[in-house]
Image (cartoon, helix red, strand yellow):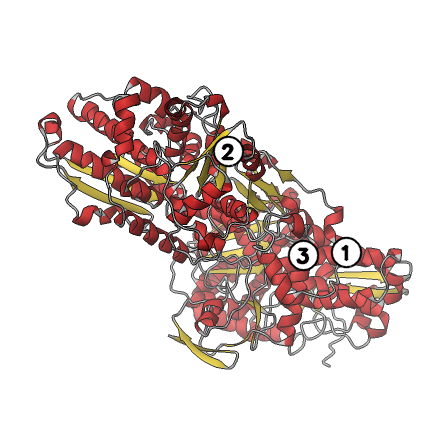
């Protein structure tokens, strides 16, 4: 188990000169940009963790002339608020990252899908966008970005549901394959990347891939922005190197009484105290899009689980059977067990159901409901039953 | 060609083939639910989940395209566990009232439960906490949300096949449901009552509104004289609900069965179909003369057929500015209805207030048509009850009739004679062909120049068909049509009707006469026909229709002796004043939504 310890990093919010970085990028060949991103080991920072270099490589390889770069700024995972900060502080780097991605894959159009609840950021974002367009124009690169607002659905953070939303249809995930790199927005090759991923990409172009690669572990290269909340004396946004244990994280952010850490929000994993020591925060252990929530001994894990299940029953698009009905069954099931109207052994059936949801659901939402369910029921069974 | 392995068996298929189709080639059945051969892939029920080597999750066979070297297993423990769960989940949100349900024994969910989920069910009944809506507002069908399993077949049907989108998906998550514009009752939205959704619903969520009990009551009311008419499309499909293969003609036995059910007079919609041709053919020629000779700019060309009530409601909602283009002729069903309580009543010396007029149709929209307020030309409700082919089969079973062993018989007289031209009304292109067989002969004095009267250019399953008939050697009365090229078009399925209407709206439609049927395949694919439906079944029914036509002695509407008689003794001539009173109608502009 590769353990890098807890180290603060200043990369995402570092002030740079966009003209300098973009000019450098536009002098590179598309292949070299992609090679740098591949060598850096950067994986998607929205939570899914797909190698960014590969995503750009596949999209670049498509012959179709019309392509899109989409910035996923839907940030819907409960407990994630780091993209909000990034957009507020360094939106010019988000735009820069999009332009670099556009060059690498051959897209002239970029769209930022902004969570509807972040509408209040728009005035500042649009002002920055105006400056960005001027700069791009001066450098001489044909690239335009426009905004598209969400309307409050968590499912629209899923890439294909996001495309459907932009296209004016119900935010329902599509059948895959074909994948977005081949058929994405409006059926065209699309690279959809998280806000933080795009900023990181721009910084990799500035500093070179090696500087990024030495950070983190073999499977989780680089650093990540975390949004810490819950029972902690120091909630907020923190940029840390990947590869720390949950224990090291709790040592830094806990209040001395941490019972559990929910890594990755409602669709993430609940790590109990006894597992802090040998759980790595990263793609080889528990991955996260940034959401880190600490619970101390005053918290009822039944309430936490109920909150997550209620969330999913509400936010599921409702399209596929395992998720639409499964979420309702899990929610009602734990309520019945808690009330004593179903035997505690019923939880075992629900764990099996969660497994079915994981393998049979159409999209990541349904596939992830079981993560929180299983880890909370496994580690805090007595809090569900009594 | 792509090579893959399914259950350790090799198979080669074209690129783009789904795993489901590839398995079918190996005669391996993967269960499905939301999948339907007439519709686009949905991939939402997850019943077809199978294992793919190297994949993190199971894959949906209906949606996954094959790839070289793919390895699939369709019945592993992982698959079986998931399948049982999925079927149980579907059952847990379905109000299973099977013994009371119209779809009992013809329900795809029941079949899946029988195959994959028998034994104790683990999950909680979710229906007890929900407030369901059962919509009985339409005269044609009932929408019972408590039985809906959200496969979205109805939504895809209404959007893709019919271009109506009267129903759609609303809300999300636990509150997701299939509903209409602002949750309005189905009678108050753009729904055309075509029943294509009913044909494709796998459960009892969508069924026709049945009138079986009312018809039994009328039959057993000694005070009432019950007449019945049967549409052409019924006779080539009724067998499917009585144990026959698709495409078997059961006309003779059907008539005998109707007598045994207790109807006082067994007559034929085909009679009034022949009548419709006389009225509509004359109307067309009159319009052509007004438009082409008299130069009347107000005469609307192209003229559209008007026997499909689903199509009528469609144009009333979506293209109301073209209502003048519709033929003013009623449908054969409604012409019959008006005559049953006037002509027939007079001839048979029966008090019309004691006549109950029943029609058996392949259609659900006909139930709506019978209820239209203007359909009272006889002074009474012209058609009292409309039964679907499916309801008819139920009545035959209820009466204990051993259908297979019946002796065939023929319809009663006065309104029971028909020709081959009438029976082809049931197929797309049939009305056009029947009209041409008569109109051409009226104008030229000769038969249509097609081998054995079979006008093949207007036949077939293509969505929009076009044909041009050159008119030569006209009789003196019709000299103005000498050398004219009559351009006709035929569309079936409302999505194709829409294609033609778009052209008309843009002024780009070169046609003089257009036949439009709301249902794919024409009436043989109607919303009241036996379930299931697919392209193969509809093709077989169409083949049976044309076979029925070929075997008839008379094959042109104007040769029908009862039609000749009714003009001589009652109507006078086509489009006469009496004809207009009883056999013609008007239309209503409706809202867009």
Q: Determine the secondary structure under disc 3.
A: helix
How far apart in space, not on screen, are marks 1 and 2 (Cα)? 48 Å
Q: Number of callouts in the render?
A: 3
Q: For mark 2, name the chain.
A: B
How crowded is the residue under tag 2: few (<14 C-alpha within 10 Å), some, or many (20+)?
many
In this rendering, position of residue B108 left or right of residue A368: left
* A323 vs A221, nearest the viewer: A323
> Are the residues under marks 2 and 3 on the same chain?
yes
The dot on residue B189 is none
Q: Is any part of residue B562 visible from this angle?
A: yes
Estimate the x, y position of residue A36 in percent, counting from the top left: 52, 72
How crowded is the residue under tag 3: few (<14 C-alpha within 10 Å), some, or many (20+)?
many
Q: Determine the secondary structure under disc 2.
A: strand
Q: For mark 3, name the chain.
A: B
Q: Determine the secondary structure under disc 1.
A: helix
| Quarter of image, res B327 | top left
How far apart in space, not on screen, are marks 2 and 3 (Cα)? 35 Å
Name above or below for residue B458 compared with residue B474: below
Most extreme residue toward the top is B577
The residue sitting at 53% across, 45% down in the picture is: B395
Circles 1 and 2 in contact, beta carbons < 8 Å:
no
> Are the residues under marks 1 and 2 on the same chain?
no
Name above or below for residue B553 compared with residue A102: above
Name above or below for residue A361 compared with residue B219: below
The dot on residue A331 is 1
The dot on residue B91 is 3
Camera-near label (1 vs 2) is 2
List the residue tagged with mark 2: B385
The quarter in which the N terminus of chain B is drawn is bottom left
């Amino acid at each position: 188990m590769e353990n890098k310890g807890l180290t603060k990093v200043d990369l995402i919010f570092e002030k740079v000169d966009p003209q300098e970085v973009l000019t450098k990028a536009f002098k590179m060949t598309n292949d070299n940009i992609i090679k740098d991103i591949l060598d850096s080991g950067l994986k998607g920072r929205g939570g899914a963790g797909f190698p960014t270099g590969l995503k750009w490589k596949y999209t670049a390889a498509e012959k179709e002339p019309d392509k899109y770069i989409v910035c996923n700024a839907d940030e819907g995972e409960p407990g994630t608020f780091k993209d909000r900060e990034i957009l507020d502080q360094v939106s010019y780097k988000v735009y820069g990252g999009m332009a670099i991605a556009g060059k690498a894959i051959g897209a002239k159009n970029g769209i930022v899908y902004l969570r509807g609840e972040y509408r209040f950021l728009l005035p500042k974002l649009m002002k920055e966008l105006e400056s960005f367009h001027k700069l791009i124009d001066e450098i001489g690169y044909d690239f335009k970005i426009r905004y598209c607002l969400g309307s409050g659905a968590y499912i629209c953070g899923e890439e294909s549901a996001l495309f459907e939303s932009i296209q004016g249809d119900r935010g329902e995930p599509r059948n895959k394959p074909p994948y977005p790199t081949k058929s994405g927005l409006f059926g065209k090759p699309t690279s959809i990347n998280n806000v933080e991923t795009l900023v990181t990409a721009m910084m990799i172009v500035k500093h070179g891939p090696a500087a990024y690669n030495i950070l983190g572990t073999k499977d989780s290269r680089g650093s990540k922005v975390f949004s810490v909340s819950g029972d902690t004396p120091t909630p907020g946004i923190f940029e840390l190197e990947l590869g720390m244990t949950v224990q090291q994280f709790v040592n830094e952010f806990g209040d001395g009484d941490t019972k559990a850490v929910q890594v990755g929000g409602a669709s993430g994993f609940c790590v109990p105290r006894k597992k802090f020591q040998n759980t790595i925060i990263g793609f080889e252990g528990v991955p996260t899009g940034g959401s880190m929530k600490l619970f101390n001994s005053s918290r009822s894990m039944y309430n936490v689980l109920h909150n997550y299940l209620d969330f999913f029953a509400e936010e599921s698009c409702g399209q596929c059977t395992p998720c639409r009905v499964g979420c309702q069954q899990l929610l009602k099931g734990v309520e019945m067990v808690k009330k004593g109207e179903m035997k505690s052994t019923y939880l075992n059936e629900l764990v099996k159901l969660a497994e079915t949801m994981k393998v049979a659901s159409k999209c990541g939402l349904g596939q992830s409901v079981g993560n929180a369910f299983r880890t909370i029921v496994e580690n805090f069974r007595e809090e569900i039953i009594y | 060609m792509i090579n893959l392995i399914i259950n350790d068996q090799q198979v080669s298929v074209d690129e783009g083939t789904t795993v489901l189709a590839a398995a079918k080639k190996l005669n391996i059945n993967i269960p499905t639910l939301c999948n339907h051969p007439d519709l686009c892939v949905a991939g939402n029920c997850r019943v077809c989940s199978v294992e793919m080597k190297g994949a993190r999750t199971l894959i949906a066979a209906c949606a996954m395209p094959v790839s070289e070297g793919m390895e699939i297993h369709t019945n592993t423990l992982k698959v079986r566990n998931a399948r049982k769960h999925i079927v149980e989940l579907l059952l847990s949100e379905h109000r299973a009232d099977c013994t009371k349900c119209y779809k009992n024994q013809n329900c795809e969910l029941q079949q899946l439960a029988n195959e994959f989920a028998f034994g104790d069910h683990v999950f909680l009944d979710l229906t007890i906490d929900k407030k369901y809506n059962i919509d009985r507002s339409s005269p044609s069908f009932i929408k019972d949300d408590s039985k809906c399993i959200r496969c979205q077949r109805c939504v895809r049907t209404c959007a893709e096949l019919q271009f109506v989108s009267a129903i759609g998906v609303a809300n999300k998550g636990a509150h997701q449901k299939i509903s209409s514009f602002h949750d309005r009752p189905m009678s108050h939205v753009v729904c055309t009552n075509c029943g294509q959704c009913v044909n494709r619903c796998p459960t009892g969520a969508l069924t026709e509104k049945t009138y079986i009990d009312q018809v039994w009551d009328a039959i057993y009311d000694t005070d009432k004289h019950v007449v019945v008419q049967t549409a052409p499309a019924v006779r080539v499909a009724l067998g499917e609900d009585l144990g026959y293969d698709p495409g078997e003609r059961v006309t003779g036995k059907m008539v005998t069965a109707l007598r045994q059910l207790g109807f006082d007079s067994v007559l034929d919609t085909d009679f009034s179909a022949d009548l419709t041709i006389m009225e509509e053919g004359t109307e067309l020629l009159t319009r052509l003369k007004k438009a082409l000779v008299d130069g009347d700019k107000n005469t609307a060309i192209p003229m559209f057929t008007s026997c499909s009530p689903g199509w009528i409601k469609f144009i009333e909602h979506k293209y109301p500015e073209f209502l003048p283009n519709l033929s003013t002729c009623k449908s054969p069903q409604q012409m019959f209805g008006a005559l049953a309580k006037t002509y027939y009543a007079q001839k048979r010396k029966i008090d019309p207030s004691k006549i109950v007029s029943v029609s058996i149709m392949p259609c659900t929209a006909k139930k709506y048509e019978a209820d239209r307020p203007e359909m009272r030309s006889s002074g009474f409700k012209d058609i009292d009850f409309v039964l679907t082919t499916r309801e008819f089969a139920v009545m035959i079973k209820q009466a204990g009739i051993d259908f297979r062993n019946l002796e065939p018989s023929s319809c009663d007289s006065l309104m029971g004679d028909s020709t081959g031209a009438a029976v082809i009304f049931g197929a797309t292109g049939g009305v056009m062909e029947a009209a041409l067989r008569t109109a051409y002969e009226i104008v030229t004095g000769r038969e249509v120049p097609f081998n054995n009267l079979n006008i093949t250019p207007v036949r077939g399953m293509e969505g929009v068909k076009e044909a041009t008939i050159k008119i030569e050697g006209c009789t003196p009365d019709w000299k103005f049509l000498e050398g004219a090229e009559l351009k006709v078009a035929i569309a079936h399925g409302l999505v194709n009707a829409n294609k033609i209407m778009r052209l008309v709206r843009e002024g780009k439609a070169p046609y003089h006469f257009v036949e439009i049927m709301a249902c794919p395949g024409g009436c043989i694919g109607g919303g009241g026909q036996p379930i299931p439906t697919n392209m193969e079944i509809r093709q077989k029914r169409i083949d049976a229709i044309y076979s029925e036509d070929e075997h008839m002695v008379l094959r042109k509407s104007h040769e029908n002796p009862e039609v000749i008689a009714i003009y001589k003794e009652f109507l006078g001539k086509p489009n006469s004043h009496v004809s207009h009173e009883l056999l013609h109608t008007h239309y209503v502009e409706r809202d867009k939504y």
